[in-house]
Image (spheres, grey):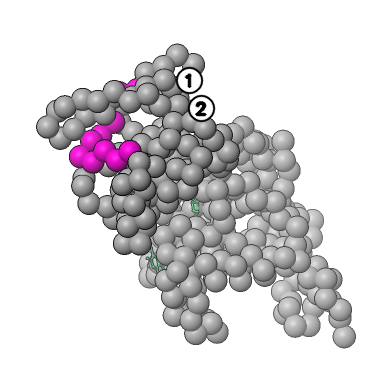
Amino acid sequence: MIKTDALIIGAGPTGLFTAHQLKLIGLNCEIVDNLDKIGGQCIELYPDKPIYDIPAIPECTGEELTNNLINQLKPFDIKFHLSERVEEVKKNNENWKVKTNKGTEFITPNIIIAGGVGSFEPRKFSPKECEKFENKSIFYSIKDKTIFKGKTVSIFGGGDSALDWAIELSKDSAVNLIHRRDEFRGAQATVDKMNELVKSNKINLFTKYQLKNVSGKENLESIEIEHDNKEIKNLKTDYVLGFFGLIMQLGPIANWGLNIDKKTINVDTEKFETNQKGIYAVGDICTYPGKLKLILSGFHEGALAARACFKLARPNEKYKFEFTTSSKSIKNRLGVKSD
Ligand SMILES: Cc1cc2nc3c(=O)[nH]c(=O)nc-3n(C[C@H](O)[C@H](O)[C@H](O)COP(=O)(O)OP(=O)(O)OC[C@H]3O[C@@H](n4cnc5c(N)ncnc54)[C@H](O)[C@@H]3O)c2cc1C
C-alpha cells in the first residue's frame, strides 16, 4: 500500500503541472495514467501540432509542451504509474483508498482527478473469444517486439501504426496485413513501402477482410478472416495485433459517487473540490460556470487544488503563501541556491 499526500489521476498537462504545484509547497504525490506514456491528449492526439496559447510560450508542439512540463518536474522525485487505470476509490476513515487495474493500492487524504476526457482505451476486436488470448497472443500495442521474431504475425488496421509495424516486423517475422478497406490512411511514403514489401512477398496483404474468429488452446493457433463478399480464409498465426485507434471513456470515474454532468465533474472554483471531501477535479474533466477547456485553465485549477490539499495532508500546519522568487524553502525544494 503506497501512502502519499496526494494522488493525481492523469499525466496530461494539467496532472503534470499540478504535481509541480504540490511539490513546490512541500507535499508528496504520485501520478497514475492509463496510457504507456506521459502527456495526455498533447502526446496521444497531437504531438506535432503547434499550440499558440500557452502563456509566455509563443509557439510549441504538443510534444515540446510535454517535455517542458517534464523538465519542470526534474528537481522532484515523482513516481509515475503508467499503463495503469484507476478503478476503485473508497473511503477509508479520513483517507481515500485507491486501487488500479494492476492491483496497485494507494492510501491518501487527497485525490486530484486530472483525467481529461477519460481514459484512452484501444478499440478492440469484436469476436468475444479474443478476450481469452488478450495480452498473450493478441495485442493492441507492442511493448517488446522481440517476442514476434521468427513467428507469424497477423496485423489488422489501415493507419500508420498498422503499416509501421507491418513494415518493421516483416524484417524478422512472417507478416499478414489485413484491412477492411482497400485504401490505407497512413502516410503515402509508408503506404508505398508497404506495397513494395507486398510485391517482394515480405508481407501478405488481405484487403476488404475482417476478423471473424480465433482459435487455439492456451495460445492462438489460427484465425478466420471474412471478405466483404462473405468468402472465408483460414490463416495459421502465432500472434494477432489490432491497431484501430483509441476511444476515450470516462470509464470507472463514473462510479465514484461524484456529481457528474455530461461526462464532466462539477467542482467549486475556490478549491476545485468535487462533492466528495478530498477529491478534486481539474483540467478538461471538471466543469463550473465559465469553464474553458484550455491547457492554461488546467494550470490555474491545479495550482488552487494543490493548495487545498495542504489542509488535509498537514492538518497541524498552516499553509503560507510564498513567491518562488523569494522563498528559501521553495528554493531548497528546487535544489537552487538562495541569495
Ligand atoms: C487536436 C487538439 C488540439 C488542441 N489544441 C489546443 C490548443 O491549441 N490550446 C489549448 O489550450 N488546448 C488545446 N487542446 C485541448 C488540450 O489538449 C486539453 O485541454 C488538455 O490536454 C487537457 O489536459 P488534461 O491534463 O486536463 O487532460 P488530458 O490531456 O486529456 O489527460 C488526461 C489523462 O488522464 C488519463 N486518465 C483518465 N482516466 C484515467 C483513469 N481512470 N486512470 C488512469 N488514467 C486516466 C488519460 O489516459 C489521459 O492521459 C487541443 C486538443 C486537441 C484534441
Do residues under tags 2 and 1 come within 8 Å of each other at their CB atoms?
yes
Q: Callout 2: helix, strand or loop?
A: loop
Left or right for 317, reference 254:
right
Q: Callout 1: helix, strand or loop?
A: loop
Residue 307 in the image: state x and y as whole percent: 65, 64
- Residue 87 appears anywhere in the view: no
Quarter occupied by the C terminus: bottom right
Q: Residue at x 45, y 14 (%)?
A: 217
Which residue, as the protein is rendered here, is positioned at the far front? 200
Residue highlighted by disc 1: 219
Stretch of the chain drawn in magenta = 203-214
Residue highlighted by disc 2: 136
Left or right for 251, reference 114:
left
Q: CA distance from mark 2 to mark 1?
A: 7 Å
Q: Residue at x 49, y 30 (%)?
A: 151
- Main SS, magenta region, reads strand
Which residue, as the protein is rendered here, is positioned at the far left? 229
Task: Identify the image quadrant of residue 328.
Answer: bottom right
Front residue (pair 186, 201): 201
Q: Amino acid at mark 1?
A: Asn
Residue 292 in the image: state x and y as whole percent: 40, 70
Task: Identify the image quadrant of residue 153.
Answer: top left
Looking at the image, residue 164 lies above or below residue 210: below
Looking at the image, residue 106 lies above or below residue 113: above
Residue 172 in the image: state x and y as whole percent: 51, 40
Front residue (pair 212, 155): 155
